[in-house]
């Protein structure tokens, strides 16, 4: 324990040690959730008789692919719902969300988002931005938003009237890259009850990205009809190389399957090549990988808060996703933070990220990412648009020890750039 592999100032070391000690109760709660969820996943594997031949994979049409069919059943079991569609063929979370929306909606239908503006990439899908790409708007499906209340939570008072006439009520669980609070499963349960009281035929759909396995229940166990997520985030456990899932009510998942492949073909086809093993293994590891990411986030929150930075969520606040926002106040601090974090990545640590004008963004963006899977944000990563309030959004960490190094090096880099001083 006395060899130091990284150049970290002793003052940073002791700051981190204090933060870690302070957060011990949060860490214990995270471990308890991981313990529960890991058992839940293991029990589902055993019940559905997962076996080695399922890893072999099929080619061509992929009829009767046992791995594919069993993985769907396992995921549905884990999420406490009727059916699931988990596929490497989903190219991203946005794609899975798009398939789900186009799968269940028909011309003339209305979507109501009760968490305000959706995630950036969804804007073109629903037709808030861009033209000529076949958005839902172009297909005659309207998209409306109920803004969040003053306190950043769902506007409970206006919800019952607003949802009238909607076909889909849409919730984005994670804060994404905003500073609003994320939506807990208990809040989703409350929304589901209110929505169903107005009209039981309304479909409650949840963008579950970054939320899987953070709590002991998923939205499908709390009244959501359909949930959607990405496999290069939580449920892929850092092992799935690409993909996404849709899970929920059987009739709705069926509609989505006919949209993913072709009407009439549905779930019956889709070869798995060799990807099933990665998806099974990733799902198996996901609860403990999510715990590592959560501990990394709590540690960063506690340490940054002690340095005087505003963080959301706070270190001791309950969490429902793996995102940690840290408001660093100016460009120099933000750049130093991201550059330091990159130095702790297992891949590409020697690269120095710089702010750049990323297509589609109004201000330059800096990104720290050094991952086994390109763009995987279950691996330690941080992104920050260079504009006030100069906040970094960080997430991930496949293991807590490596996540901790990333946080230490981020602070070390800020110290070296004289962004702050330590006694
Ligand atoms: C990641 C994410 C998505 C989907 O993004 P992709 O990059 O397409 O996978 C959608 N919503 C939220 C809240 C997300 O975090």
Image (cartoon, rainbow, N blue to C red):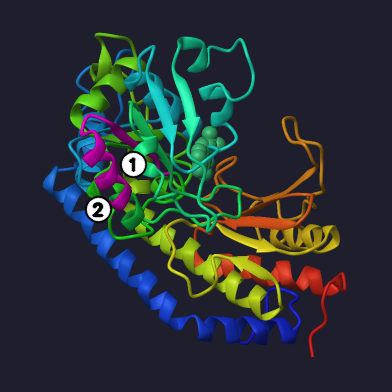
Q: Residues within 10 Å of mark 2 (few under 14, many from 20)?
A: many
Q: Secondary structure at mark 2?
A: helix
Q: Establish if 68 lies above or below 31.
A: above
Q: Which residues are magenta?
A: 190-208
Q: Residues within 10 Å of mark 1 (few under 14, many from 20)?
A: some
Q: Are marks 1 and 2 in contact (CB under 8 Å)?
A: no
**For residue 79, side relative to residue 261 (left or right):** left
Quarter of the image holding residue 266? Answer: top left
Disc number for residue 160: 1
Residue 92 in view here: no
Residue with the most extreme bottom position: 423
Earlier in the chain: of badge 1 and badge 2, it is 2
Could you tell me which residue is drawn at 51 percent across and 16 percent down? 137
Circle 2 is placed at which residue position? 41
Q: Position of residue 278 (x, y in %)?
A: 38, 41
Q: Secondary structure at mark 1?
A: helix
| Badge 2 residue CB within 8 Å of ligand 1 | no
Q: Nearer the viewer, residue 333 or 2?
A: 333
């Amino acid at each position: 324990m006395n060899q130091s592999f990284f150049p970290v100032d002793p003052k940073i070391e002791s700051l981190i040690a204090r933060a870690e000690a302070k957060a011990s109760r949060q860490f214990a709660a995270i471990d308890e959730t991981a313990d529960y969820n890991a058992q839940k996943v293991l029990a589902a594997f055993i019940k559905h008789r997962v076996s080695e031949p399922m890893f072999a994979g099929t080619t061509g049409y992929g009829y009767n692919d046992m791995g594919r069919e069993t993985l769907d059943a396992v995921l549905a079991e884990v999420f406490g719902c009727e059916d699931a569609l988990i596929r490497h063929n989903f190219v991203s979370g946005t794609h899975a969300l798009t398939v789900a929306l186009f799968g269940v909606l028909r011309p003339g239908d209305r979507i109501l988002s009760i968490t305000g503006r959706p995630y950036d990439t969804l804007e073109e899908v629903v037709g808030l931005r861009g033209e000529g790409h076949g958005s839902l708007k172009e297909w005659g499906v309207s998209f409306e938003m109920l803004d969040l209340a003053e306190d950043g939570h769902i506007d409970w008072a206006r919800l019952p009237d607003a949802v009238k006439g909607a076909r889909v009520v849409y919730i984005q669980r994670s804060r994404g890259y905003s500073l609003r609070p994320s939506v807990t499963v208990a809040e989703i349960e409350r929304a589901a009850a209110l929505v169903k009281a107005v009209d039981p035929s309304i479909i409650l759909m949840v963008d579950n990205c970054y939320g899987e396995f953070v709590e002991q229940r998923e939205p499908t166990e709390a009244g959501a009809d359909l949930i959607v997520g990405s496999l290069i985030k939580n449920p892929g456990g850092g092992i799935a190389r690409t993909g996404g899932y849709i899970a929920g009510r059987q009739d709705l998942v069926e509609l989505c399957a006919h949209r993913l492949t072709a009407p009439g073909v549905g779930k019956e086809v889709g070869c798995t090549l060799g990807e099933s093993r990665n998806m099974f293994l990733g799902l198996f590891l996901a609860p403990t990988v999510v715990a590592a990411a959560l501990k990394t986030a709590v540690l960063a929150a506690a340490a940054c808060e002690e340095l005087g930075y505003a963080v959301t969520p706070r270190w001791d606040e309950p969490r429902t996703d793996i995102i940690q926002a840290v408001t660093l106040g100016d460009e120099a601090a933000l750049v130093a933070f991201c550059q330091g974090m990159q130095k702790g990545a297992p891949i590409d640590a020697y690269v120095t990220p710089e702010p750049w004008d990323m297509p589609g963004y109004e201000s330059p963006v800096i990104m720290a990412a050094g991952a086994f899977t390109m763009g995987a944000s279950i691996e330690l990563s941080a992104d920050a648009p260079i504009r006030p309030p100069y906040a970094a959004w960080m997430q991930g960490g496949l293991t807590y020890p490596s996540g901790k190094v990333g946080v230490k090096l981020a602070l070390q880099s800020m110290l070296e750039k004289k962004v702050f001083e330590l006694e």
